[in-house]
Image (cartoon, grey):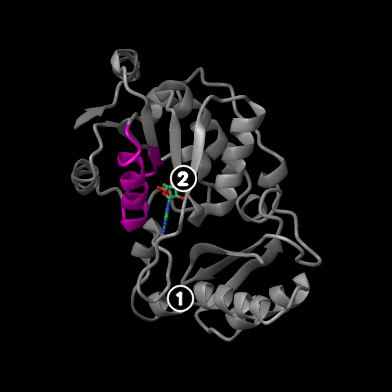
């Protein structure tokens, strides 16, 4: 496995690579969710590349950039074990040199939910993803449904800017108690770790209501809200029932829909989501 940091080296590696590239972009601090994306990419037949870049542009001033876990050695071991042939891990100064002045500003699916909770977040995501896709020129990129809004924002970006890459959505991988794997789970211990399962419990409760025939968006939202309110360790940021592509709230669920939820547990911002459909 090659670890490439300098951009000229990455460009040379890209020019020399004859096989199509299967790309998994990450912030690092790999867990079973990332590994599932890598396995999916590995099985696809091209050459598996991963980017490992803790992108400061997608973190707000009051967020956890400084404390975000950075277990580089372990990440590289996991990547190698999963069959990654090249890891691109640029420095912040290389990717955003002093003269850097161009940003991608997504609207549409980026506007609500995480877009409101974390102003500037999706601008940072869209900008770095556009740069990484341009540099790596992958045939496919593997993205987790765990970050469902991010997935839709990147699909929108690829569509609108005619980026020549196929986006492959991958299912959310969960701990045995339902908590979705996240690098931020490392911040949770003891009671907070137990409280964190409330996101999954709220989604399941709303999905059960849906399966029992409930189609009113506000009733499904109320079920999620009540479930989080009953968990003393958690504070709801938002709960929503949305169109799966536009992420606009649904008054009535008629076709496919997505349940979105975000909450703070012990000061940690956690998100989750689930599909509901006929
Ligand atoms: P991150 O390093 O948090 O930016 O995540 C990198 C990729 O892994 C993104 O496409 C995420 O959606 C995906 N991912 C994160 N957590 C999970 C999970 N629990 N299951 C599946 N994919 C995930």
- SS under mark 1: loop
Q: Is residue 7 above or below residue 54?
A: above
Image coordinates of residue 85 in percent, x first then y, are 24, 32
Asked whether residue 9 appears in the rendered view, the answer is yes
Q: Quadrant of the C terminus?
A: bottom right
- Label 2: how many Cα within 10 Å (few below 14, some 14–19, many 20+): many
Residue drawn at x 39%, y 81% as measured from the top left:
191
Residue at horizontal 52 percent and vertical 42 percent from the top: 58
Quadrant of the rendered image containing residue 32: bottom left
Q: Left or right of 73: which side holds 182?
A: right
The label number, if any, that marks residue 197 in the structure image: 1
Q: Are marks 2 and 1 in contact (CB under 8 Å)?
A: no
Q: Would you identify the image quadrant in which residue 226 lies?
A: bottom right
Q: Which residue is mark 2?
A: 143
**The N terminus sits in image quarter:** top left
Membership of 266 in magenta stretch: no
User: Foreground: 194 or 143?
Assistant: 143
Report x, y in % for residue 224. 63, 76
Closer-to-camera residue (88/86): 86
Q: Could you say where residue 144 lies in the image, as x and y percent from the top left?
A: 46, 50
What's the mark number on residue 59? none
**Disc 2 CB within 8 Å of nearest ligand 1 atom:** yes
Magenta region: which residues?
Answer: 24-45
Is residue 42 in the magenta section?
yes
């Amino acid at each position: 496995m090659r670890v490439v940091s300098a951009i000229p080296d990455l460009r040379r590696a890209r020019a020399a690579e004859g096989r199509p590239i299967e790309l998994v972009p990450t912030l690092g601090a790999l867990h079973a969710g990332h590994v599932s994306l890598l396995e999916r990419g590995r099985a696809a037949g091209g050459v598996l590349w991963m980017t490992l870049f803790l992108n400061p542009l997608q973190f707000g001033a009051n967020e956890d950039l400084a404390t975000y876990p950075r277990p580089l050695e372990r990440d590289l071991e996991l990547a190698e074990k999963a069959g990654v042939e090249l890891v691109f891990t640029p420095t912040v100064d290389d990717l955003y040199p002093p003269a850097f002045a161009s940003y991608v500003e997504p609207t549409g699916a980026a506007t609500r939910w995480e877009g409101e909770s974390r102003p500037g977040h999706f601008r940072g995501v869209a900008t770095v993803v556009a740069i990484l896709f341009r540099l790596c020129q992958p045939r496919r990129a593997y993205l987790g449904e765990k970050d469902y809004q991010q997935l839709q924002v990147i699909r929108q970006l690829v569509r609108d800017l005619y980026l020549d890459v196929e986006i492959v959505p991958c299912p959310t991988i969960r701990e045995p108690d339902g908590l979705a794997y996240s690098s931020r789970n490392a911040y949770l211990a003891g009671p907070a770790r137990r409280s964190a399962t409330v996101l999954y419990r709220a989604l399941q409760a709303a999905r059960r209501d849906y399966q029992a025939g409930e189609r009113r968006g506000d009733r499904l939202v109320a079920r999620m809200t009540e479930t989080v309110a009953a968990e003393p360790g958690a504070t709801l940021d938002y709960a929503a029932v949305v169109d799966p592509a536009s992420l606009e709230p649904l008054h009535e669920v008629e076709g496919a829909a997505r349940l979105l939820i975000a909450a703070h547990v012990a000061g940690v911002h956690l998100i989750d989501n689930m599909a509901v459909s006929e």
